[in-house]
Image (cartoon, helix red, strand yellow):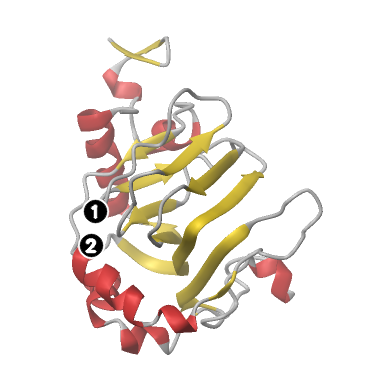
Amino acid sequence: YKFCLQRKVTYSMIDYNWIVNKSNLPWLKLALDFDHEGMLAEAQAIKHLFVAHRDQDQGAYRHKGWRSLCIHGVSSEKTNHYEQYGYKSNQDTPYIWTEIADLCPITTNFFKQVFPFDTYYRVRFMLLDPQGFITPHQDAFENKLSPINIALNNPEGCKFKMKDHKGYVPFNKGTAFLLDVGNTHAVFNDSNDDRYHMIVHGKPNKEFKKLVETSYEKNGNK
């Protein structure tokens, strides 16, 4: 038997669907290697192309210094959820590799040749300015592990907090996490450096599911 969040489960129960949908983990570190330095350099080189992401007052949400750019999406500058552009589902949305993909060969090759997805929805660079913040919010109506958040860097003093869990998501440069964004969360970049992450949405395949299972066995919710 193995304990997970004070629940006793057998190893035979621990598969991808259980981990993602029923484990109640706030995050899961993925056993994923990537050239974060090369990808960071590409993101920094096109910093001038980033657009404001939810910076405007949106009801209860108010953010500062949060910017984004799609390498895969409806367009490079349409960084929000498909519903905001009049689409009804991911399957209905005309996602493309944007012109940003041509400017970022290391990043593009990683997602086309290495990352274990066959089908992508949004793949975005996410930039948080020094002293920028993302106020508490939820991005889903249910608790499950999705999407993937990849840290190209993570300046000292930049913290990602989830409401119902102690401590902070243990991001370091070169780490990737599946996150439960149905849990209220917030970020504050209390540093003098830009924070560059990537957020990946897509359709899991068998290889990705195996990665999640292997990562759970290695890391649990550490």
Q: Which residue is mark 1?
A: 174
Residue 155 higher or lower than 14, as above or below? below
CB-based contact (under 8 Å), mark 2 and mark 1: yes
| Crowdedness near tag 1: few (<14), some (14–19) or many (≥20) residues, C-alpha within 10 Å | some
Q: Secondary structure at mark 2?
A: helix
Residue drawn at (27%, 62%) of the image: 115
Residue drawn at (30%, 57%) of the image: 153
Which residue ends up furthest to the right in the rendered image?
Answer: 59
Q: Position of residue 207 (x, y in %)?
A: 26, 53
Residue 63 higher or lower than 215, as above or below? below
Q: Residue 167: which quarter of the image?
A: top left
Report the front residue among 109 and 16. Answer: 109
Q: Is residue 194 left or right of residue 84?
A: left
Report the front residue among 169 and 204. Answer: 169
Residue drawn at (50%, 36%) of the image: 161
| Crowdedness near tag 2: few (<14), some (14–19) or many (≥20) residues, C-alpha within 10 Å | some
Asked whether residue 168 is in view, the answer is: yes
Q: Amino acid at mark 2?
A: His
Asked whether residue 97 is in view, the answer is: no
Q: Is residue 137 left or right of residue 198?
A: right
Q: Earlier in the sequence, mark 2 or mark 1?
A: 2
Report the front residue among 149 and 59. Answer: 59
Residue 18 numbered tag: none
Residue drawn at (50%, 25%) of the image: 165
Q: Which residue is mark 2?
A: 36
Structural distance between the alpha carbons of marks 2 and 1: 5 Å
Q: Position of residue 75 (x, y in %)?
A: 55, 83
Q: Residue 64: which quarter of the image?
A: bottom right
Q: Quadrant of the C terminus?
A: top left
Residue 146 higher or lower than 163, as above or below? below
Q: Position of residue 166 (x, y in %)?
A: 47, 22
